[in-house]
Image (spheres, rainbow, N blue to C red):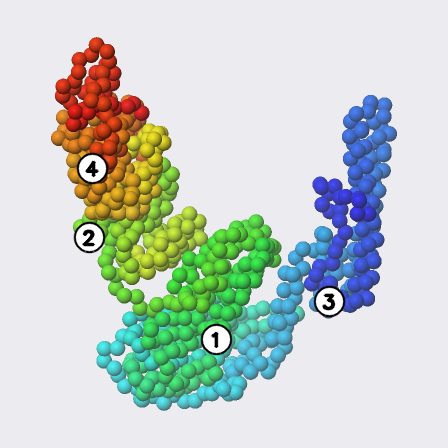
């Protein structure tokens, strides 16, 4: 039967296998019997495949036969179709019988899966049996909780049957380790000048500016169940389970508004403690208590504990810390008040690393598993400074997969290389990650802005600007604003390290992406942000961005009024011809990121991609081959620099014999100069259609120069004393440039011929 292949367009012609989850529940006898039935079904499926192929051949033959045979051929095709229908019906009835036989091995809660109304695919129980199994498990768990009346909550089981239930029975003693008592007030003392700490948002961010205090913590057991619901409102929290109506008599855990309600309820409690001078940070049912000395901490925790018990809350002694400590576990993280950092517990690190390693090994995984891993990674962000950079690829791919699967978390998705790269970072770096609670003040600030034309920045008294290239001009303005921040930082801070930089920007999207280290709305902006932060991490630079109104943004002018006369670039084809003659230069001394001819270049002002700023401030080494196309006013200074540093350069200059630097240029030649072609776009501004306004008047020379005298002398010895045609008069000076045989000049009595490129 292996030789019988299934037609490619007949996906359903395959034997029906039992879902692995159900197969694991079956007894060995049932498995053996079902395997035999599957072999019989395999025979039926192969027969259907052959009939399908036969019908395909008959249909092709029918189109080639005459009209007198059409009726007989159609009858044969109809008989074949009826045969396939009968075999399909037999296969369906067999699957129904298989379900009925397997039903006796399944628990009652799985019996509904055996219903004939549930369609089968290539799997006997359908494709979403895992989701149905999870629903069954959740329902079983709910049933056990509802039927368990001895669940050790402080006030019964938290709900009533039949839609009626009396008032709460008070707060008795719970499990071992829980206690209650009266509030002993009057023990606190006021502390003048103490700061107030909000209990609305917990976590390490509320500890900013707090010195190295000693700390305690108090955790409440089943905090929500300590909040009774008014009887007239209990009907709004009803649900039906097995034809019985239940309603909550206390605050449910799953209620969307429950965290906010409980937080507002606890505000007066912590306000009372703060009025007595006790410092605390609270988040729902967890509270962190602080003090300058051990005695203050003990007094703080004792009075907080007494007040909580007096109000009817149950203290979770196993999770609470009553002894003052400088290192304490709060909200699942370890807070160190000496180093002012937050780190993850070792057990949590090992768990997350193991989950990431398991996901890296897979090429395909369920969306639910990926979401589970993403949840674990997000739970660490309060203790991992740069964790935001390395989970969004997973989140973006998960969202896309959910769209294609119509929200089904049990469908599979591909684990891409980008996702694996992020997971690999967590595996390799999580053990050494931390979060700094208190960042130092910014060392300096800068302002940026972007327009559709270019970008600008202001740092101290220095202003810089730049034009967008052809690709960048197509980007959205939010992307351009983010690029402006990136270019500004790289231009001004490439030589800095261990600093904090504050950047002012007038675009809220760019601000959010930088401060949040990325986002999921724009994949492009997320990638730019990630590259920017990675660049900063390599230099230990911390950046924070704040909003500045556009009308106060001093960089706005720089981004809109771009000076076009600073970006002239030699035609690429002409440059490549020169490279073929003299080789590729190692460094471009007068360029920007838009008009540089080689990757390594120096810029006039700070540039995000420049290696150096101000070419005259560095040594022009004789071991480096430089390319120079300087502003015309700097040609004389450049020649002096070449001579001083004994450098070797490829220099582009205008053919201006009237200038004082012209004879000096000729004396520094080590090869015959090349006259550049007269073409309209010999000089242009990258990203624009602008050409040099003097393109019809200017003539340019490409010169190979050296500051080493022995090289120039060696070239001059190769030059002839005269160079003319028969019948011409001998030149007596170098003032005559043009003759019938081309452009020439004379240096030290030797004739230099200018070759055309």
Dot 4: within a 10 Å radius of its alpha carbon, few (fewer than 14), some, or many (20 or more) residues?
few
Residue 296 falls left or right of residue 249: left
Q: Residue at x 63, y 75 (%)?
A: 144
Tell me the mark number nearer the camera, choosing from 4 and 3.
Answer: 4
Provide the residue designation for mark 1.
Answer: 224
Residue 361 x/y as whole percent:
57, 59
Q: Which mark is residue 25?
A: 3
Q: How busy is the neighbourhood of tag 3: few (under 14 within 10 Å), some, or many (20 plus)? A: some
Label 4 – label 1 distance at C-alpha = 89 Å
Q: Are marks 4 and 3 in contact (CB under 8 Å)?
A: no
Quarter of image, res 132: bottom right
Marks 1 and 3, how far apart at CA: 39 Å
Q: Which residue is mark 4?
A: 709
Q: Decide if residue 554 is in sight here.
A: no
Q: Is residue 218 above or below residue 472?
A: below
Q: CA distance from mark 2 to mark 4?
A: 44 Å
Mark 1–mark 2 Cα distance, whole angstroms, equals 54 Å
């Amino acid at each position: 039967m292996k030789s019988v292949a299934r037609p490619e367009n007949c996906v359903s012609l395959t034997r029906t296998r039992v879902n692995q989850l159900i197969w694991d529940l079956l007894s060995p006898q049932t498995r053996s019997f079902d395997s035999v039935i599957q072999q019989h079904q395999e025979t039926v499926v192969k027969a259907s495949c052959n009939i399908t192929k036969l019908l395909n051949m008959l249909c092709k033959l029918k189109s080639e036969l005459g009209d007198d045979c059409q009726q007989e051929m159609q009858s044969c095709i109809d008989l074949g179709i009826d045969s396939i229908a009968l075999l399909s019906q037999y296969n369906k009835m067999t699957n129904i019988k298989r379900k009925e036989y397997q039903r006796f091995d399944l628990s009652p809660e799985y019996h509904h899966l055996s219903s004939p109304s549930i369609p089968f695919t290539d799997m006997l129980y359908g494709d979403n049996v895992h989701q149905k199994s999870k629903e069954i498990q959740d329902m079983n768990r709910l049933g056990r909780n509802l039927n368990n009346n001895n669940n050790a909550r402080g006030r019964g089981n938290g709900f009533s049957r039949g839609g009626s239930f009396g008032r709460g029975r008070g707060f008795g003693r719970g499990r071992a380790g829980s206690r209650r008592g009266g509030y002993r007030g009057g023990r606190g003392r006021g502390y003048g000048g103490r700061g107030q700490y909000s209990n609305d948002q917990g976590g390490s961010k509320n500890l900013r500016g707090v010195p190295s205090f000693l700390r305690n913590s108090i955790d409440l057991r089943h905090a929500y169940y300590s909040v009774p619901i008014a009887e007239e409102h209990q009907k709004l929290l009803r649900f039906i389970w097995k034809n019985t109506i239940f309603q909550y008599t206390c605050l449910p855990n799953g209620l969307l508004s429950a965290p906010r309600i409980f937080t507002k309820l606890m505000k007066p409690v912590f306000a009372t403690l703060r009025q007595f001078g006790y410092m605390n940070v609270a988040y729902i049912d967890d509270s962190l208590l602080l003090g300058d000395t051990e005695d203050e901490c003990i007094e703080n925790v004792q009075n907080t504990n007494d007040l909580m018990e007096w109000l009817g809350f149950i203290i979770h002694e196993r999770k609470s810390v009553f002894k003052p400590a400088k290192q304490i576990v709060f909200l699942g993280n370890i807070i160190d008040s000496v180093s002012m950092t937050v780190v993850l517990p070792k057990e949590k690190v090992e768990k997350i690393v193991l989950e990431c390693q398991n996901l890296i090994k897979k090429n395909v995984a369920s969306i639910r598993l990926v979401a589970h891993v993403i949840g674990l990674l997000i739970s660490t962000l309060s203790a991992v400074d740069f964790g935001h950079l390395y989970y969004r690829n997973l989140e973006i791919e998960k969202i896309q997969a959910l769209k294609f699967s119509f929200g089904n978390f049990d469908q599979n998705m591909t684990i891409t290389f980008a996702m694996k790269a992020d997971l690999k970072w967590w595996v390799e770096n999580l053990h050494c990650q931390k979060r700094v609670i208190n960042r130092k003040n910014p060392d300096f600030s800068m302002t940026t802005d972007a327009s559709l034309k270019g970008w600008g920045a202001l740092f101290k008294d220095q202003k810089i600007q730049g034009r967008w290239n052809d690709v960048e001009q197509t980007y959205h303005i939010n992307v351009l604003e983010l690029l402006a921040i990136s270019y500004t930082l790289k231009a001004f801070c490439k030589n800095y390290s261990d600093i904090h930089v504050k950047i002012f920007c007038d675009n809220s999207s760019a601000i959010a992406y930088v401060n949040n280290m990325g986002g999921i709305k724009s994949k492009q902006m997320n990638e730019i942000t990630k590259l920017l932060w990675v660049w900063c991490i390599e230099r230990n630079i911390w950046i924070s961005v704040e909003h500045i109104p556009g009308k106060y943004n001093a960089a706005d002018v720089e981004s809109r009024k771009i000076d076009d006369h600073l970006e002239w670039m030699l035609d690429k084809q002409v440059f490549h011809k020169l490279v073929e003659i003299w080789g590729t230069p190692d460094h471009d001394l007068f360029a920007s990121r838009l008009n540089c001819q080689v990757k390594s270049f120096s810029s006039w002002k700070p540039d995000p991609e420049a290696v150096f700023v101000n070419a005259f401030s560095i040594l022009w080494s004789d071991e480096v081959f430089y390319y120079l196309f300087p502003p015309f006013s700097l040609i004389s200074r450049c020649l002096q620099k070449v001579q001083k540093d004994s450098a070797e350069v490829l220099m582009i200059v205008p053919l201006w014999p009237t200038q004082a630097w012209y004879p000096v240029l000729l004396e520094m030649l080590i090869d015959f100069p090349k006259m550049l072609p007269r073409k309209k776009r010999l000089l242009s501004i990258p990203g624009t259609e602008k050409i040099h306004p003097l393109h019809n008047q200017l003539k340019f020379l490409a010169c190979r120069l050296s500051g080493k005298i022995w090289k120039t002398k060696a070239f001059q010895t190769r030059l002839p004393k005269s160079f003319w045609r028969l019948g011409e008069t001998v030149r007596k000076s170098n003032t005559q440039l043009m003759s019938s045989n081309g452009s020439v000049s004379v240096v030290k009595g030797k004739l230099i011929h200018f070759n055309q490129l």
